[in-house]
Amino acid sequence: MKIVLAAIIFLGTCINVFAVEYTLDELYKIALERSERIMISKENVFISEKEKDEALSLLFPKLSGTGAYTGYKDRKINDAGTLLQPYESSSWSVNLDQTMSTSGRELIALKIAKDNIEKNKMDFFSVKEAYMLLVTNSYYDVLKAGKLVEIAQANIVRLIKYRDAAATQLRIGEVTKTAVLRAEAELSGAQSDLVKAESLFSSTKAILQRTVGLEGDFDLYDIHKSVSSDVKNISNGTDDPLNLQCASLYLECLKDVAYSQRAELKSSTIQKNIAERQVQYTRGAHWPTLSLQGVYMARHETPETGSLIRDNLYGGVRLTFPFFEGGLRRAETQEAMAKERQAEYALSDLKKSISVEVENAYLDYVTQKGVLKPSGDQVAFARDNYNAVSKQFDFGLAQSIDVIDANTVLVTAETQFMQALYNYQQSIIQLKRVTGMLLDSITDTSKKGTTIQ
């Protein structure tokens, strides 16, 4: 059994040697380049830029040309002998047209289009931040699953050692056969836990692979190489994880940062401005429309008629008043005003939601920070306890149930500490996300080549 287990662990280690290893920063960079969700949002920015060009085009006059040719079956002559219809005629013209609302609706539409570009840029930023948080959570899910596999493997090694010790003491009459049977049962359960842990590890890797867009097998770089490392060397965090150096209460400072940095709030504010301009744009439809036209026309006939005008140049001005359209304009204005109120409500609701998100993220950070140190101490105490009980059992000074209990406590402590360690890291990332600082911190750390902690 020892040989088989050692072979499995060695084979897994060899496979990982040939796998590509990624840091969290590298995963961020790959995801930003390959994510379809991010690309869709990026195209929205491009589309809004083209919509601005379309709005700008309405401010320029339209130049168009027209050409025509007409062939007749025969010519027509009146009683006086005057030619009325030739065999053929051709004409061409150049038209210069400009239509403008006297309310300046076209300028308002251009401002709306420019605001929409900024809104889509904020939405693009928000999508990237949300996706980076998704990558982060998937990354830590894989690390957690990997640590569960390591804990399960270490548990099997301890149980095999305990089972062999129990079998040795059974032969010399120190324990009964129930001790060996209990050891075998615990070992079988540990092997089952290992299978489940490996399955979870494979599942989380597949999710991360899909999220980031990775190809082939890969491994992850983890600054915390082992959950059984000296917990005294692991930082317990600071009172200012985001280095804000606030003069006021830290939670209130976080909220102020979120109000000024969150892309969603900026986008909602721009949407409110767009809704206000949309009311102005809709009201502008009540104003008359001014149209200017300039035309140059040339005509040719074979044979020429007496009324032929070979070329002509003329212009025109038209002013259109929308006196009555069945209540259409009034309904459109009321609709635009309702959407403006909706935008105000949405902005107020979003601000309240962000406040709650920041508070929950901060409380989670405080909780994870407080749990980390005791969880590390628990691992140290549980490991020392297991080592002591195992030695006592070897010398016949402890019962088999004591070893099993000590091993169970150690497995539980290692699992809880691993969860606390990664949850603490995730709580800092979540705090950066809810304050709108995540993407900027990723950019800064990528330039420095360090991993976010």
Image: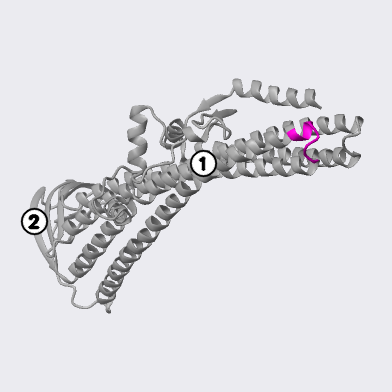
Specify whether 422 is left or right of 1. Answer: left
Q: Nearer the viewer, residue 350 or 450?
A: 450
Circle 1 residue? 421
Q: Which residues are magenta?
A: 392-399
Which of the two labelled residues, at mark 2 and mark 1, occupies the earlier sequence position? 2
Query: Which residue is rendered at x = 45% and y = 47% of the image?
Result: 369
Q: Quadrant of the N terminus?
A: top right
The reply to whether residue 297 is visible in this rendering is yes
Where residue 140 appears, x then y in whole percent?
52, 40
Specify whether 38 is left or right of 218. Answer: left
Query: Which residue is rendered at x = 21% and y = 57% of the image?
Result: 109
395 inside magenta stretch: yes
The rendered magenta stretch, by its main secondary structure, is classed as loop
Where residue 133 appears, x then y in whole percent?
45, 45
Count the labels in the image.
2
Quarter of the image holding residue 38? Answer: top left
Residue kind at label 1, given as amino acid type: Leu
Q: Is residue 449 above or below residue 254?
A: above
Residue kind at label 2, given as amino acid type: Gly
Circle 2 residues within 10 Å: few <14, some 14–19, many ≥20: few
Query: Which residue is rendered at x = 21% and y = 64% of the image?
Result: 281
Query: Which residue is rendered at x = 31% and y = 49% of the image?
Result: 122
Circle 2 residue? 315
Where residue 194 appears, x then y in whole percent?
71, 38
Q: Is residue 312 above or below residue 379?
A: below
Q: Are marks 2 and 1 in contact (CB under 8 Å)?
A: no
Closer to viewer: mark 2 or mark 1 = 1
- SS for tag 1? helix
> Between marks 2 and 1, how big is the CA–CA gap?
79 Å
